[in-house]
Image (cartoon, rainbow, N blue to C red):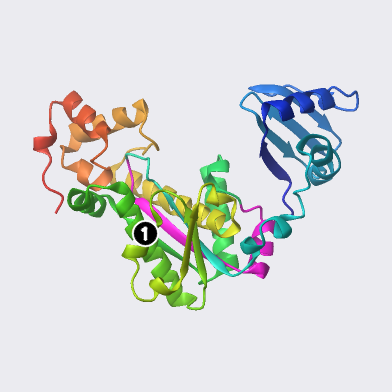
């Protein structure tokens, strides 16, 4: 299917220009929460949110973007010119991304995905984009399934379970170094399947040399790039969705194993669930379910009458 949903982050000047454009009588006002303005035209919905995010959806979305948004607001042509704007995105390379880094419960999952020009076109057809822009877990899971069908064996995943994560952190005491190790393993594992891949791209989370130092002989032959907002690259976007699906699956499995609904993030709800879990099973349960270096651990233990000294070593 074609992509019928597009998101843009607009500057204040672009927002003001768009608001003027959307006051034209051909746009029918609609009511959407948290928007500055929401309108529709036949087969196209246009929502400008208070955050400055613009969401354009519908069968006629591409047409409106090409003939209205780009020439009148963005002042540049992007849609349909991706290959000219970023030619390396269509050339053979792999992308690496992770999920679970900021979540108290659950593992750290790192995925890698290989693409070339033909695979990029297929991924674009199913609407592959950064997993952070996908609000539904079920949508992410279904899209990950479709990505695996397209890529076949040209992807890899590293899952650092909680006990292994806590044991590794007790020795390294640096999340970025652990992340670099996971990225390096994801690169190495995918190179076993696609040995001729010339380049790897990931989001920039720390010095590039951290990943380079963790690479083994085969991985040291690949060109390694890091950049901010790398999720705009199709290979990194595919990896981000695969990693998120792996993380969601791990949380659901954990919920069944320990009989509780495992929330994401590190919110007050997460603390409450962790407190109930510790009260029922003791402090050692955190080693198998949580990332114990989070400050959340101290708050949870204190609330239930424990402290860090009650945590056994992560063996």
Would residue 158 be seen by someone viewing this image from the given angle? no
* Residue 258 figure quarter: top left
The image position of residue 224, as x and y in percent, is 46, 64
Element at badge 1?
A: helix
Residue, x 39% and y 46% (percent of image)?
Answer: 100
Crowding near pointer 1: few (<14 within 10 Å), some, many (20+)? few
In the orientation shown, which residue stands out farthest toward the left?
Answer: 309
Toward the viewer: 204 or 46? 204
Nearest to the observer: residue 269 or residue 190: 190
Pointer 1 residue: 209
- Vertical placement of 61 versus 187: above or below? above
Residue 135: x %, y % from top left: 56, 39
The residue closer to the viewer here, 161 or 253, is 161
User: x, y (%) of residue 55?
Assistant: 69, 36
Query: Which residue occupies the extreme right position in the image?
Result: 25
* Residue pictured at 55% horizontal, 67% vertical: 93
Task: Please report the bounds of the magenta region as a residue range.
Answer: 105-128
Which residue is painted at 78% across and 44% down in the image?
76
Whether residue 211 sits left or right of residue 276 in the image: it is right
Q: In this view, does 153 lie to the left or right of 260?
A: right
Q: Is residue 47 left or right of residue 132?
A: right
Residue at the image point whose x is 23% and y is 34% from the top: 297
| Rendered position, 244 above or below 121 | above
Q: In which quarter of the image is the N terminus?
A: bottom right
Quarter of the image that includes the C terminus: bottom left
């Amino acid at each position: 299917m074609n992509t019928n949903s597009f998101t843009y982050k607009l500057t204040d000047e672009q927002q003001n220009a768009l608001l003027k454009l959307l006051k034209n009588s051909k746009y029918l006002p609609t009511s959407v929460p948290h928007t500055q303005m929401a309108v529709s035209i036949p087969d196209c919905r246009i929502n400008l949110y208070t955050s400055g995010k613009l969401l354009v959806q519908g069968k006629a979305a591409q047409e409106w973007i090409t003939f209205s948004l780009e020439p009148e607001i963005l002042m540049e042509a992007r849609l349909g010119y991706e290959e000219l704007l970023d030619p390396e995105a269509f050339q053979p390379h792999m992308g690496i991304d992770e999920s679970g880094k900021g979540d108290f419960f659950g593992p750290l999952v790192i995925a890698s995905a290989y693409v070339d020009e033909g695979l990029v076109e297929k991924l674009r057809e199913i609407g592959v984009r950064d997993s952070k822009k996908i609000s539904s877990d079920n949508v992410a899971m279904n899209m990950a399934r479709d990505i695996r069908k397209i890529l076949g064996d040209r992807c890899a995943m590293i899952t650092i379970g909680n006990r292994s994560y806590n044991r590794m952190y007790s020795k390294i005491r640096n999340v970025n170094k652990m992340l670099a190790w996971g990225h390096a393993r994801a690169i190495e594992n995918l190179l076993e399947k696609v040995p001729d891949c010339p380049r790897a791209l990931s989001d920039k989370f720390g010095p590039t040399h951290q990943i380079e130092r963790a690479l083994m002989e085969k991985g040291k032959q690949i060109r390694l790039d890091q950049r901010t907002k790398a999720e705009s690259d199709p290979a990194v976007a595919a990896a981000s969705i695969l990693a998120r699906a792996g993380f969601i699956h791990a949380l659901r499995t954990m919920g069944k194993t320990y009989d509780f609904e495992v929330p994401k993030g590190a919110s007050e709800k997460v603390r409450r669930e962790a407190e109930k879990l510790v009260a029922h099973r003791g402090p050692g349960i955190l080693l198998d379910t949580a990332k114990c270096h989070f400050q959340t651990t101290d708050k949870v233990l204190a609330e239930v009458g424990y402290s860090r000294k009650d945590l056994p070593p992560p063996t």
